[in-house]
Image (cartoon, grey):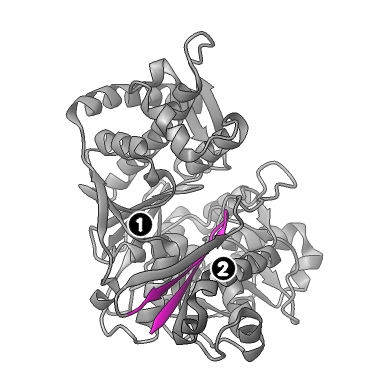
Amino acid sequence: MLLLGIDLGSSSVKVSVIDGGKGRTISAASYPPSEMEISAPLPGWAEQDPEQWWKNFTLALAACLKPLGPKRKSIGAIGISYQMHGLVMVDKERKVLRPSIIWCDSRAVETGERAFDRLGKDFCLHHLLNSPGNFTASKLAWVKENEPDIYRQIYKIMLPGDYLAMRLTNEIKTTISGLSEGIFWDFMRSEVSQELLDYYGISHDLLADALPSFSLQGELTAEVAAELGLTPGIPVSYRAGDQPNNALSLNVMKPGEVATTAGTSGVIYGVTDKTQFDPMSRINTFVHVNHTKRLTRLGVLLCINGTGILNSWLKKNTGAGLTYPEMNDLASAVEPGSNGLFIFPFGNGAERMFGNRDIGASVHGLNFNIHQQGHLYRAAQEAIAYSFRYGLEIMKETGINPTVIRAGEANMFLSKVFRDILSSLTSTVITLYNTDGSVGAARGAGIGCGFYKTEEEAFHGLEVTGSSEPDHHMALIYDARYNEWLDILENYLYE
């Protein structure tokens, strides 16, 4: 059986087809070739058109299926990974009512903070394991308060992956993991939090019915199958947010295992069997993909909004046509520490680890007579690594203390400069694998449809492709530099 995986990101949509038996990717494609636009009608806002997601998916799928020829008829299941925390709203005709308010949109920060205060810290942290913060429930409450005409037309709300699944199957469903990422889930009662809905004045009817992440969630309709060049009736048998799915793709399924990504945002994601929370709500706990009533599997997630987007911004605005490998070459020619140049990468909205403050990105110590492009590119990769260490130190307070971190061959982890900095700075081994989100979604589809009899079977073909180990000399340099960076940051935060 062939398995189709879809990864709906905020930058692009990637599609992969794997040979289920061998666990090998046989075709893959992504679209668009440049990053998808994120609209910002007002400062702190971030929106995307769900119809654009669908168009980009169809183009990526067409490119992926083209070399398969008749083999495409062997595709037996579909899995979906998607950008977390977004809000999609449709009316009774299943038409989208407004652009999706996506994960990095900051407009609902105050809405969530008021809910945290009114519902009470004790209730939120013990029942929701999180502050309502700037998550999907708070985004919906913002729409209710500020766009009442749109709110009155809502039939169902969805996460981005739920929307894509609806287009494929004509079924409106979600997952328990998805409800938890929207901060709708009461972990103590294992049900949707009625207290949260009552506080926000949101009807339970607006929420889709929830299924396990691994389950039969609808079948490809004949009409859509004809449009896509696929066989009708293929089941959608897995869906998960991008970070739980990234963990799945790296076989991070057991307590103590840790995965990380550094795309537009950066994430450290550790699996635990303990129902725990950060008292300051700087990190978040969600239902992991393999959680059941009998087996507690939760994902502890720290998100840094401003990571890879800094590197992307530099490429667009200072790169003069350079590729990322060329930027990395320039960065590698610069000595560790970038000759005193510091960057703060936090220019992508409110940062959870700073109490939902939007502190912006900034450059410190720039000297026009010393610093050149390479210094800027290395300082950016150092800044992203510093922000990961800052976040990892927060996670250690909740018992997540990795010695090995797994990552896919993607985004910032394609840079050896970045991997070596992060490994030395955090005293961890960085292990790379031949996988990505779309491949993980394909493996998830195989579990959900029953093709794989055990989780272990799903990871045939997952291989280590590289690693970075801490360098003692570099660690000494970067430990000192990190403390300087931290001093400037704390002065900036608390001045």
Which of the marked residues, 1 or 2, is nearer the chain's N terminus? Answer: 2
Kind of element beneath mark 1: strand
* Quadrant including the N terminus: bottom left
Question: Residue pushed farthest left?
Answer: 472
Q: Which residue is mark 2?
A: 63
Kind of element beneath mark 2: helix
Q: Is residue 15 magenta?
A: yes
Tally the numbered discs. Answer: 2
Q: Which residue is mark 1?
A: 300
**On screen, 212 above or below 193?**
below
**On screen, 171 above or below 355?**
below
Span highlighted in magenta in the image? 1-20
| Residue pictured at 39% horizontal, 24% vertical | 485
Residue 273's disc number: none
Residue type at numbered disc 2:
Ala
Where residue 214 appears, x then y in whole percent? 40, 79
